[in-house]
Amino acid sequence: MIGVIGGSGLASPTLFTERRDTFPVTPYGAPSGPVTLARSGDTKVAFIPRHGPAHTVPPHRVNHRANLWALRETGADRVVATSSVGSLKVPVRPGTFVVPHDYVAFWSIPTYYDAEVRHVTPVLDEELRSGLASAARKAHARAASKGVYVQATGPRLETRAEIAFFKTVGDVLGMTIASEATLAAELGLPYAALCSVDNYCHGIARSSVTWESIAATQRKNAAATEAVLAAALGVLG
């Protein structure tokens, strides 16, 4: 079973059939929403909306520990996620996708090991990454098969000075993937992400960045995100 974490613009995807909501209890509190057990073609999936079914959970309040735990408890043995990101490089244009191969996170990352000394080296799974990149080609979507994801904390957007620094180390910027990938590594779950580039970050392009403009692009890119995800589940299942 493949666990799917739906980001902004994919809170209620239409590609799933035989849907059944479950409400797993975790040691870390409530997840963002019910875990939906379903199928995508012949592939069994366990789906959770990162920001809740109605997109009411802000990025800095997402209970990543509960989300990843709930997916594993319902039978997921690997996880793919979708995410809305901003571009740190002019050639990485809004309306395209990036499948990150690595990430940078300078701020606090959640862990399951608060009470013991454990050190895990997180990675983004190559097989899942390859499947996502292949699926993007099948869906006729423009996608970069490599990129470095930088995680900020939110909920505010970043300053020009912050972006000027971040673009020296990364290609896209978001608020969630590094936390999920690290926790997945702690649980032994292979993890990869499909990032929808929905805007240029502050100062990268001449136009100003507002949440309204980002949300509008997210809505435009939602259908393409769902098409790539459907193709990926077919490839990986």
Image (spheres, rainbow, N blue to C red):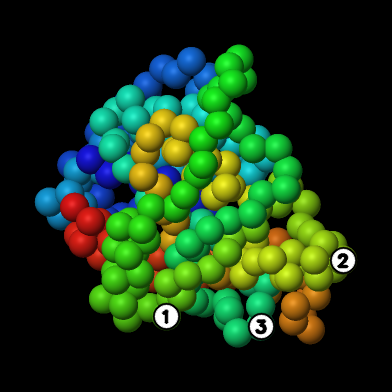
Q: Secondary structure at mark 1?
A: loop
Tell me residue 213's x, y (percent). 67, 69
Q: Is residue 106 above or below residue 150?
A: above
Q: Is residue 129 found left or right of 49 in the rendered image?
A: left
In the picture of the structure, the residue carrying the numbered disc 2 is: 161
Q: Is residue 41 found left or right of 50 in the rendered image?
A: left
Q: Which is nearer the eye, 121 or 13?
A: 121
Q: Is residue 39 found left or right of 185 in the rendered image?
A: left
Q: Is residue 28 above or below residue 92?
A: above
Which residue is depicted at the point 80% across and 75% down?
203
Amino acid beneath label 1? Arg
Amino acid beneath label 3? Val
Which residue is depicted at the point 72% across and 70% down?
167
Whether label 3 touches label 1, CB < 8 Å: no
Tell me residue 52's x, y (percent). 51, 39
Residue 67 in view (yes/no): no
Counting residues from the start of the chain, the first of labels 2 and 3 encountered is 3
Amino acid beneath label 2? Ala
Residue extending farthest to the right is 161
In the picture of the structure, the residue carrying the numbered disc 3 is: 90
Counting residues from the start of the chain, the first of labels 3 and 1 encountered is 3
Q: Which is nearer the eye, 186 or 29?
A: 186
Whether label 2 touches label 1, CB < 8 Å: no
Counting residues from the start of the chain, the first of labels 2 and 1 encountered is 1
Separation of marks 2 and 3 at Cα, in angstroms: 17 Å
Separation of marks 3 and 1 at Cα, in angstroms: 15 Å
Crowding at dot 3, Cα within 10 Å, few <14 / some 14-19 / many 20+, comes out as: few
Residue 162 in view (yes/no): yes
Q: Which is nearer the eye, 150 or 221?
A: 150
Q: Secondary structure at mark 3?
A: loop
Separation of marks 2 and 1 at Cα, in angstroms: 29 Å
